[in-house]
Each structure stands twice: as structure tokens, then as C-alpha cells.
Image (spheres, rainbow, N blue to C red):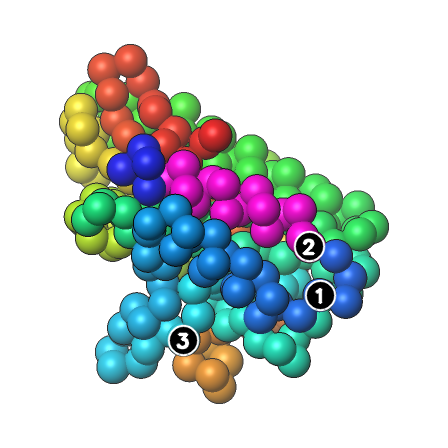
């Protein structure tokens, strides 16, 4: 899983570098797939099926008010001032890796910067709670508290997840919750922790394409994710280079 996640980290670093105004998101998808296959891995999202609906691309690219699951397209072009969520997963020798970042396209306004910072920092707060004997609610509550401290809201319709021989495994990892509740963390578990944070209200809806989740109030959204193993020495962030 470390190898799978290192490939994910490498691809995300590459995508972060290619982001610029004028870039069609389909090009980012091409870069990700090419780099992944060259490493002997398989993009995990391409062909992923939910209720008979198949995700057609390798990366989820979600811009501004898009929360998650945006579909790369030749027609969708990055613009100066956008914030771009890039969510990527691979399968390597039967094991999955999954991570996400949100990046600025050129110069962005102060709220966008604050939103991205709060979301990434909330992920860090959640990861700190990944300790043997802690409960899932400790992770969830830490994320929620950090987000709400800045006046933003966590998305409730989508959650993080266990990960391993499948992309999505038990348990679900909500970005909201109560300390001392939920599954007790044991050595060897791996969690994909992924706060999705809206600048406005927490409500989301799905666009006509059947995949893209957007904020109901049109506010912007940020998303960061790491795959994190529970070890006796604390959290091991598998998707961190
Ligand atoms: Mg995930």
C-alpha cells in the first residue's frame, strides 16, 4: 500500500506542477493515466461503478463550487483564480492508494486561500488522532472542530473510508462526529481521511452528469485526502512523499 500511495503522491505532485490558466482538465487526466501505467499501476477511478454508473476518467477534478467527482473534459479549461480539487487513486499489485489535494490556479482571493488552508489543516488534525486505541469519532470530531473554527462547513453526504484490497472498505470515516464514539482504531488499519469543506453551507447536490457534486449555495469547496495507516508508533501517512 505504501508503493501504491507513493505512485498517487507522485502523480499528484506532477498534476500540481502542470496546473495553469488555459489548461483543459482532460490533459491532466492524460498525464495521470500515462504516469500511472508507466509505474505498473492501474488508475482506480477509471471504470469505477456506482449504481450502474461508470466513472469515465482516471482523475476526479472538481473546480470552485464543485465538491468532488468532477469529470475531466477537453471543454473544461482552468482559469486564473480557480481552486482545483484533484483526487486520484491507483491499484498496484492488488492494493489501493488514494489521496487528494486542492490547488490554486494563479492568483486566488483571500477566502480561497483560507478555505484551502483550513481544509488541509483539518486533515492534519484528523491524522493526529490516528492512534492505536483512539476511536473513529476522535478523528471525525477533530476535523469538524478545525473546520468550524474558521466558519466553514464540512460536507456530510460524502465521507472518507477504509482502504486496502478494495478502494472503499469499512469503516466509513465521516468528517463530523463525536469524540469517544465509533470503531476503535487497531494496528494495521488503513483509513482514507478526506475532509470536503464548503465556504458556505454544507449541502451539496449532484449535477446532470450523474457524478459531479456541487455546493447547493454555489459557494466554493476544498478537498484534501491522505491514506493513513494505524501503527503502534502513531499515524503513518502512506500517501506522503
Ligand atoms: Mg477517497
Spatial separation of the CA atoms under disc 3 and disc 2: 21 Å
Dot 2 and dot 1 residues touching (CB under 8 Å):
yes
Is disc 1's CB within 8 Å of ligand 1?
A: no
Spatial separation of the CA atoms under disc 2 and disc 1: 7 Å
Dot 3 and dot 2 residues touching (CB under 8 Å):
no
Q: Residues within 10 Å of mark 3 (few under 14, many from 20)?
A: some
> Is 189 in front, or is 134?
189
Dot 3 falls on a residue whose secondary structure is loop
Residue denoted by label 1: 23
Residue in the picture at 39% in, 47% down: 39
Residue 141 figure quarter: top left
Highlighted magenta segment, given as a residue range: 5-19
Spatial separation of the CA atoms under disc 1 and disc 3: 19 Å
What numbered label is drawn on residue 53? Answer: none
Percent of width and height locating residue 170: 18, 49
Percent of width and height locating residue 42: 33, 57
Let me know if residue 35 is in the magenta part. no
Say which label, 3 or 2, has the lower sequence index: 2
Residue in the picture at 63% in, 47% down: 16
Percent of width and height locating residue 158: 38, 59
Dot 1 falls on a residue whose secondary structure is loop
Let me know if residue 12 is in the magenta part. yes
Magenta part, dominant SS:
helix
Q: If the image is split into quadrants, where does the N terminus sit?
A: top left
Is disc 3's CB within 8 Å of ligand 1?
A: no
Tell me: 114 left or right of 207. right
Residue in the picture at 77% in, 67% down: 22
What numbered label is drawn on residue 19? Answer: 2
Dot 2 falls on a residue whose secondary structure is loop
Residue in the picture at 41% in, 51% down: 38
Percent of width and height locating residue 163: 25, 46
Amino acid at each position: 500500500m505504501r508503493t501504491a500511495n507513493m505512485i498517487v503522491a507522485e502523480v499528484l505532485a506532477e498534476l500540481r506542477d502542470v496546473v495553469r490558466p488555459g489548461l483543459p482538465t482532460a490533459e491532466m487526466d492524460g498525464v495521470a493515466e500515462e504516469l500511472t501505467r508507466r509505474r505498473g499501476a492501474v488508475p482506480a477511478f477509471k471504470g469505477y461503478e456506482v449504481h450502474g454508473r461508470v466513472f469515465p476518467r482516471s482523475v476526479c477534478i472538481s473546480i470552485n463550487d464543485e465538491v468532488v467527482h468532477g469529470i475531466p473534459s477537453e471543454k473544461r479549461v482552468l482559469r486564473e483564480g480557480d481552486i482545483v480539487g484533484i483526487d486520484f487513486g491507483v491499484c498496484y499489485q492488488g492494493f489501493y492508494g488514494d489521496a487528494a489535494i486542492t490547488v490554486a490556479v494563479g492568483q486566488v482571493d483571500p477566502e480561497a486561500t483560507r478555505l484551502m488552508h483550513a481544509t488541509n489543516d483539518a486533515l492534519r488534525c484528523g491524522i493526529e488522532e490516528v492512534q492505536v486505541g483512539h476511536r473513529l469519532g476522535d478523528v471525525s470530531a477533530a476535523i469538524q472542530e478545525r473546520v468550524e473554527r474558521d466558519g466553514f462547513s464540512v460536507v456530510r453526504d460524502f465521507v472518507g473510508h477504509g482502504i486496502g484490497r478494495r478502494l472503499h472498505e469499512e469503516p466509513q470515516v465521516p468528517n463530523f462526529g463525536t469524540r469517544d464514539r465509533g470503531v476503535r482504531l487497531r494496528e494495521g488499519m488503513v483509513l482514507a481521511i478526506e475532509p470536503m469543506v464548503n465556504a458556505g453551507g454544507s449541502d451539496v447536490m449532484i449535477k446532470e452528469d450523474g457524478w459531479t457534486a456541487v455546493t447547493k449555495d454555489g459557494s466554493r469547496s476544498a478537498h484534501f485526502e491522505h491514506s493513513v495507516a494505524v501503527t503502534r508508533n502513531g499515524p503513518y501517512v502512506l500517501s506522503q512523499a
